[in-house]
Amino acid sequence: KAGVTQTPRYLIKTRGQQVTLSCSPISGHRSVSWYQQTPGQGLQFLFEYFSETQRNKGNFPGRFSGRQFSNSRSEMNVSTLELGDSALYLCASSPQADITDTQYFGPGTRLTVL
Amino acid sequence: DAKTTQPNSMESNEEEPVHLPCNHSTISGTDYIHWYRQLPSQGPEYVIHGLTSNVNNRMASLAIAEDRKSSTLILHRATLRDAAVYYCILRRVQGAQKLVFGQGTRLTINP
């Protein structure tokens, strides 16, 4: 089975631009979560989608948004980019939304904001 | 969010056992204890999880204290490939998919 894939792997943008990152979960997985990883803040939860519905959201400004499609693929969007948005963005999928489900992480998209 | 406390770093030698401690004094009765690790330049990967009883899998063992206020991840024979940051995470039924990562323990394995 193919793992979680994220595209693009690397991205360079300038301040004020917007960006869309894509995540394809493992086939059959219905839950997708997004995380931001920075050297200063570590790994922080952004949001979680299950069956096209956002079920949980982390403490991030409204510039960060996401969505999930009927095939479980997910996108996250960051508008009006700031230098502090430079980070590794990780996507994770799991079969359902059960507390014992393993979350499988993709390799991440490294975003650099200049 | 339920909080866990781990040492910032630990060091061990190849082929020796490693015991990674985690304190979670505010754990509630239905919280599951999960461990993930992050190898260099990779996304985190699942290691093991448990509720009350000790657990074993092909990667590691999880020893949970009787009062559940602490747990220990045991790598029985560390290899160089086990060098990673290890995260101890409590998962609650509400918001179960939200993994709250602390700073984790950076494990160094000496050849």
Image (cartoon, coloured by chain):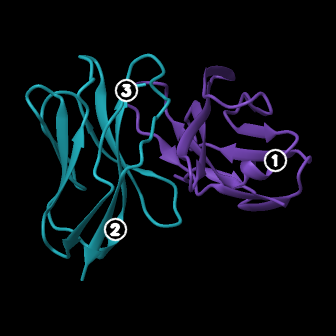
Chain colours: A purple, B cyan
Query: Are callouts 3 and 2 both on one chain?
Result: yes
Task: Calculate the distance from the C-alpha at mark 1 to the C-alpha at mark 2.
Answer: 33 Å
- The vertical placement of B26 against B9, above or below, is above
Q: Position of residue B88 (x, y in %)?
A: 32, 42
Where is residue A99 drawn, in percent x and y?
Answer: 39, 25
Q: Nearer the viewer, residue A82 or A22?
A: A82
Report the residue marked by disc 3: B2
- Alpha carbon separation for disc pair 3 and 2: 26 Å
Secondary element under disc 2, as helix, strand or loop, is loop
Is residue B8 or residue B83 the one in the foreground? B8
> Are labels 1 and 3 assigned to the same chain?
no
Q: In the image, what residue occupies the spot 13% across and 64% down?
A: B17
Q: Nearer the viewer, mark 1 or mark 2?
A: 1
The label number, if any, that marks residue A82 in the structure image: 1
Q: Amino acid at mark 1?
A: Glu
Tell which circle, 3 or 2, labels the residue nearer the N-terminal end: 3
Residue A62 percent location from the top left of the image = 78, 27
Q: How far is mark 1 from mark 3, CA to CA?
A: 30 Å
Place residue B65 in its image quadrant.
top left
B93 vs A42, left or right, is left
Residue assigned mark 2: B83
Q: Chain of mark 2?
A: B
Q: Could you say whether the residue bearing mark 1 is in a helix, strand or loop?
A: loop
